[in-house]
Image (cartoon, rainbow, N blue to C red):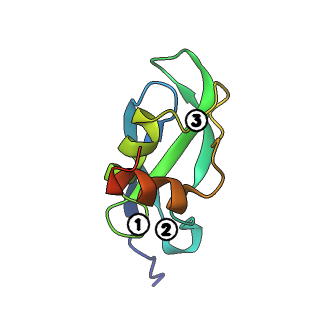
Amino acid sequence: MIITAKPTVSMCYCTQCGSSFPILRTNKKIREPGHLKKLWCNKCKKETNFIEIRGFGKYTYEDFLIEFKYGNFSPEGERIESHWKKFVSEHKRGDN
């Protein structure tokens, strides 16, 4: 009998419009917090970067909302401030 690992559900959020959808990941394929992945966005009608967020971890949906609200993504969907931890912590404190 083959035993397979139970997949975990991650949510992917478009860096351009904020739309989302779930994806399944096995433990072998889990990515780092705040991982960017190029995917087709049905709302934008183009390929753009999506942020992958797990239900646990260092990068949360709240972190994504802060980056999205304050425009930390370029038109191509790349992070403008490469150190998102610093960017998010500054905006959580309300400095900007």
The three-letter amino acid code for the residue at tag 3 is Phe
Image position, residue 44 (x, y; %): 51, 17
Image position, residue 47 (x, y; %): 63, 26
The three-letter amino acid code for the residue at tag 1 is Pro
Q: Nearer the viewer, residue 20 or 83?
A: 83
Name which residue lies at 51% across and 26% down.
16
- Whether residue 34 is visible here, answered yes or no, is no
Up/down of 43 relative to 10, above or below: above
User: Could you say which quadrant of the image residue 66 lies in?
Assistant: top left
Name which residue lies at 41% across and 31% down.
18
The three-letter amino acid code for the residue at tag 2 is Thr
Image position, residue 30 (x, y; %): 53, 67
Q: Nearer the viewer, residue 93 or 68?
A: 93
Q: Nearer the viewer, residue 74 or 1?
A: 74
In the rendering, which numbered label is found on residue 26?
Answer: 2
In the rendering, which numbered label is found on residue 73?
Answer: 3
The answer to whether the residue labelled 3 contacts the one labelled 1, judged by CB atoms less than 8 Å apart, is no
Image position, residue 48 (x, y; %): 61, 30
Disc 1: which residue? 7
Q: CA distance from mark 2 to mark 1?
A: 4 Å
Q: CA distance from mark 3 to mark 1?
A: 29 Å
Which of marks 2 and 3 precedes in the sequence? 2
Q: Nearer the viewer, mark 3 or mark 2?
A: 3
- Asked if residue 1 lies left or right of residue 82, the reply is left
Up/down of 83 relative to 73, above or below: below
The answer to whether the residue labelled 3 contacts the one labelled 2, judged by CB atoms less than 8 Å apart, is no
Q: Nearer the viewer, mark 3 or mark 1?
A: 3
- Asked if residue 85 lies left or right of residue 49, the reply is left
Q: Residues within 10 Å of mark 2 (few under 14, many from 20)?
A: few
